[in-house]
Image: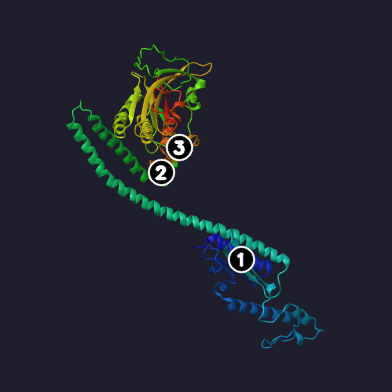
Amino acid sequence: MPTSSEFINLCQSQVALLTQGLGAALSIVYLAEEFTTDTDTHLVPIVAHPEMALNWGEDQILSFLTQVRLNLRQQRLLAAQPHQAVDDSLEWQPEAAEETNSAALFSQSLVYPTDVLLPQQQIVLPFIYQDRVMGLLVTARADRAWNDSERRQIEHIAESLTAASVLDWRVRWLAQDLQQQQLLEERKTDLFDNLLHQFRNPLTALRTFGKLLVKRIQPSDANRSAAEGIIRESDRLQDLLKQLDAAIDLEADDLIPLLAAPLTVTQSASQTISPSESASEAPSESSSEAQPEAPAHPSPSTAITQSSIHPSAQALTQPFFQPLPPSETRLLLGSAIDLQPHSISEVLQPLLDSATVIAQDRQLTLCIEIANRLPQVWLDLRALREVLNNLIDNALKYTPAGGQVYVSVRRVRLQPANRATVTHQAILIADTGPGIPTEDLHHLFERHYRGVQAKTDIPGTGLGLAIARDLVRQMQGEIEIFSPALDCKLLTLNDLQPLSPEHPGTAAVVWLNEVK
């Protein structure tokens, strides 16, 4: 990888400091070709003074210093005896000088044999980082030795170049890593494009087969719902494929606005959601909205005090239309959640039709209890469909054969202390599976966290609950997970069987706001 121009400029400035400030006749900065602990690492000269020294070997360097020393000797002799000619062909010998000659004594104290460079006149300092050789600084002068103060200055220069070389390596590594990541992203995009292209054909065929089945099966046939489920899930897959196709084509500039822009929640009606308002009292048990008889179950309209519910459900008693942070989960590349008045069964019933078929195939009992004529709630159809699909899929997936999955929708009146009663609807999905360890409960909504389930053969990505909570909160609701399942105050032992210490079960509750 090439050395950065910034590092070259720094080396040049430090070499200039050695030359002009400390009188170095020769300075060379070497860099290692590889970042390694190998002592045989090849060193490459990158900056030198004089510049021609970049291509010199040891013999040429020694010859240069020798010539510099001779030139200095001649200059001093000429300065000491200006009227005496100097014969360059004569080799100067200290013992031939007269002791009374002060100029000779001065030269003798500074000039040494021409083929020897004393250790005090040269300094070689390696650049060491984490036991790795990063480079080398070589500097020398021919006329005198380095004193302690000068050595300390040169050591500081070497330390600065060591730190700079480490930073330069890191910059080069990051640049190389970025280049590799870009190449991988390009290959991944090509792979996704190929898979999407190949996926569309069987999906179209599956949807066509579903339509043919619906035409051939009588409306009264019990298998008709299964055929309709094929078409419904095919449509859902096509919608997801469109989103995936659009996401693959996104560039970095397209993603920045999605990360920075606040989440937009629209509400078609002029009425705002404020469960804490006391102007509208909760309907009583004798309300004209009749509930089905279910003596073995709690009443679909249940009064619960503030102290008996989970803190996340207590949050429902506070006004919801507050500014929300940017969301990581959006339905379609930044599209807003569109809150509209809808019945929960409008979303839930088609999902239960598919769940019934899956439960039969897996030898599970699916119990459904949905109160009749429930008021509408504020929701986004696509968002709630995604949430409930994830929760039902988890219940079916983690419940062993012979177990039970229980789905219920009921009205719940929350009574905060010294405040008016507020009413919400709770969607309860419970199972008789192995449950969730206590240590995992606090991490359930973290993206990609699977906890103990990661050790099983059950496939999963750890994203379902994180996506579900994100979408529920965008709909101004809340979601709770309980394990053992009976920790949920909305559930009784009569609702869910069989439960045991080995299979304590799990319960998920989605709270949504009624339209007033």
Which is nearer the eye, 333 or 395?
Answer: 395
Visible residue check, residue 268: no
Q: Quadrant of residue 295?
A: top left
The mark found on residue 126 in the picture is 1
- Check the image and report above or below for 415 versus 193: above
Q: Determine the CA span between mark 2 and mark 1.
A: 47 Å
Instruction: Tell me which amino acid carries mark 3.
Output: Ala
- Check the image and report above or below for 421 versus 52: above
Q: Residue at x 43, y 20 (%)?
A: 412
Query: Mark 3, mark 1: which one is toward the viewer?
Result: 1
Q: Residue 40, how many percent across, how many down? A: 54, 69
**SS state under label 1:** strand
Q: Quadrant of residue 352?
A: top left
- Check the image and report above or below for 200 versus 212: below
Instruction: Tell me which amino acid carries mark 1.
Output: Pro
Instruction: Tell me which amino acid carries mark 2.
Output: Asp
Packing grade of label 3 (10 A; few <14, some 14-19, many >=20) is few
The mark found on residue 255 in the picture is none
**SS state under label 3:** loop
The reply to whether the C-beta atoms of the residues labelled 2 and 3 are less than 8 Å apart is no
Q: Which residue is mark 3?
A: 261
Q: Which residue is mark 2?
A: 254
Q: Quick check: 246 left or right of 227?
A: right
Visible residue check, residue 311: yes
The reply to whether the C-beta atoms of the residues labelled 3 and 1 are less than 8 Å apart is no
Q: Residue furthest left?
A: 216
